[in-house]
Image: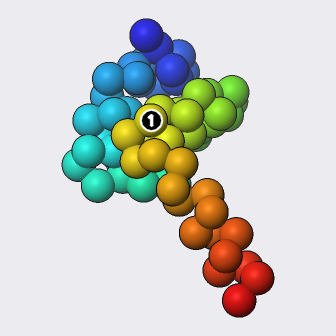
Amino acid sequence: MYVCVCKAVTDRQIREAALGGARTLKDLRRDLGVTRECGRCASCAHDCLREVHGDAKTPAKASRRSA
């Protein structure tokens, strides 16, 4: 499915980028151009990253803030 229509980026491409090391939307923007135009794809792209890397990243951020 197309996630970023502006740049014709699919969920498969995002997952491949995530498996190749992309961890943030900034990484996807640099590698695939996601979120550069209208930005409507940001939440879906972020969900694709979470599917690959899991939600374990969210609690780690929270614990760093409180430290």
Total labels drawn? 1
**How did the renderer colour the structure?**
rainbow
Whether residue 27 is visible: no
Please identify the residue farthest to the bottom as the structure is shown: 67
Q: On the picture, is 55 further left or further right than 39?
A: left
Q: The N terminus lies in which quarter of the figure?
A: top left
Check disc 1: other Cα within 10 Å, few if <14, some if 14-19, many if 20+. Answer: few
Q: Secondary structure at mark 1?
A: helix
Q: Amino acid at mark 1?
A: Glu
In this view, the residue in front, 67 or 24, is 67
Q: The C terminus lies in which quarter of the figure?
A: bottom right
Image spot of residue 9 (x, y percent): 41, 23
Location of residue 21 (image quadrant):
bottom left
Image height of 3 relative to 19, above or below: above
Q: On the picture, is 19 further left or further right than 32?
A: left
Image spot of residue 48 (x, y percent): 47, 33
Image spot of residue 12 (x, y percent): 32, 23
Please identify the residue farthest to the right as the structure is shown: 66
In this view, the residue in front, 25 or 36, is 25
Residue on which disc 1 sits:
51
Image height of 57 relative to 33, above or below: below
Q: Residue at x 26, y 45 (%)?
A: 19
Image spot of residue 20 (x, y percent): 23, 49
Q: Residue at x 58, y 69 (%)?
A: 60
Q: Residue at x 51, y 20 (%)?
A: 3
Q: On the picture, is 50 further left or further right than 31?
A: right
Q: On the picture, is 39 further left or further right than 66?
A: left
Whether residue 57 is visible: yes
